[in-house]
Image: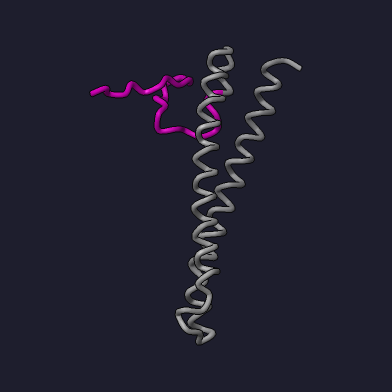
Amino acid sequence: MSRHAVGVALSLRLHAAETAIDAALAETARLAVLLPAARARARLSATVGGKAFDGTAAAIGALATARSHLIDTHTTLSALARRLGLDDLAVGPLDKPEDDIRPGGGVAPVATAKG
């Protein structure tokens, strides 16, 4: 299998993982929104369901951490793809804030101010 084919396979799995984490984060946040309303509709004391609220909040935190780790992985793999001359894989399907989109295609890292 060529380096390009390996890169494409990794890119597809990385984007699938990022999408899955985002979907899980969104669904867990929706659950967090519904918990207080469900407690109120059931006419339960504010003290009821505390562990469910805590568990949901912890899950959101864990998913946010997982998302951050995947972003780090993405950055690392993008840099590796560029070093291997696989620039088309390093771009990915979405614009990134650190990329300077150039007319005619291609990207260049945006210069950061050091101070």
The residue lying toward the viewer, choosing from 2 and 80, is 80
Tell me where residue 73 appears, x and y as whole percent: 55, 31
Residues drawn in magenta: 90-115
Q: Residue at x 53, y 25 (%)?
A: 76
Residue 55 quadrant:
bottom right
Tell me where residue 5 appears, x and y as whole percent: 71, 21
Q: Residue at x 50, y 48 (%)?
A: 64
In the displayed structure, would residue 96 be above or below residue 102? below
Q: Is residue 53 left or right of residue 24?
A: left
Residue that sits furthest to the bottom in the current view: 43
The residue lying toward the viewer, choosing from 13 and 62, is 62
Query: Which of the image's four quarters has the N terminus?
Result: top right
Whether the magenta-drawn stretch holds residue 86 is answered as no
Tell me where residue 69 appears, x and y as whole percent: 53, 38
The residue lying toward the viewer, choosing from 66 and 33, is 66
The residue lying toward the viewer, choosing from 26 and 35, is 35
Residue that sits furthest to the left in the current view: 115
Q: Is residue 6 left or right of residue 75?
A: right
